[in-house]
Image: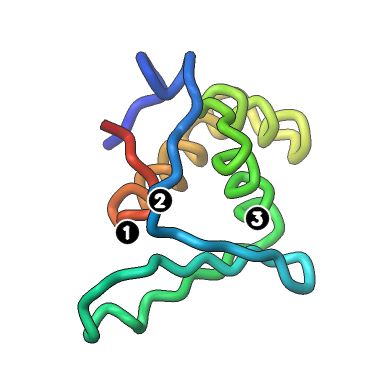
Amino acid sequence: MMRLEGRSVSRGIPCKANVVSRVADGEAIVVPIRSAANDRNSIYTFNQSGTRLWAMVEEGRSGAEMATFLQTEYGLSAEEARLDTEEFLGELAREGLIDLA
């Protein structure tokens, strides 16, 4: 499990260069550009909170800032917000959309 410590707390989370995104009807649509023909089925859409978190990734915000946003915007406890942010960023990293290294 990814933790909001070290780099991800103090610095922004870099988006991969091979990813393009747009917001349509309030939802982010994220498409990784991959060279293999069998990788074309990867299109990701996010709900309202995911769309805002994705925008924060694109803005270079830190994981800690994202957790604070969730806490403030949705009334989550600090622990819930941290865990939700870790889960979201972990999924993005597993899908190759961001670089947590």
Pinpoint residue 10: horizontal percent, then vertical percent.
48, 14
Count of numbered labels shown in the rendering: 3
| Residue picked out by circle 2 | 17
Q: Position of residue 52 (x, y in %)?
A: 68, 48
The spot of residue 37 in percent (x, y) is 24, 85
Badge 3 marks a residue whose secondary structure is helix
Tag of residue 3:
none
Marks 1 and 3, the one that precedes in the sequence:
3
Residues at discs 2 and 1 in contact (Cβ within 8 Å): no
Name the quarter where the N terminus is drawn. top left
Q: Quadrant of the C terminus?
A: top left
Sequence-wise first label, 2 or 1: 2
What residue is shown at x 37% (from left), y 52% (from top)?
91
Judged from the image, the secondary structure of the residue bearing numbered disc 1 is: loop
Q: Secondary structure at mark 2?
A: loop
Disc 1 target residue: 95
Look at mark 3 in the image and give the residue it sits on: 51
Report how far apart the C-alphas of labels 2 and 1 lie in the structure: 14 Å
Label 3: how many Cα within 10 Å (few below 14, some 14–19, many 20+): some
Which amino acid, mark 2?
Ala
Residue 14 position (above or below residue 30): above
Report, in whole angstroms, how far the alpha carbon at label 2 lies from the one at label 3. Answer: 18 Å
Please tell me which residue is depicted at 53% across the width and 26% down the height of the picture. 62
Which of the marked residues, 2 or 3, is nearer the chain's N terminus? Answer: 2
User: In the rendered view, does 2 fall on the left or right side of 27?
Assistant: left
Report, in whole angstroms, how far the alpha carbon at label 1 lies from the one at label 3.
16 Å
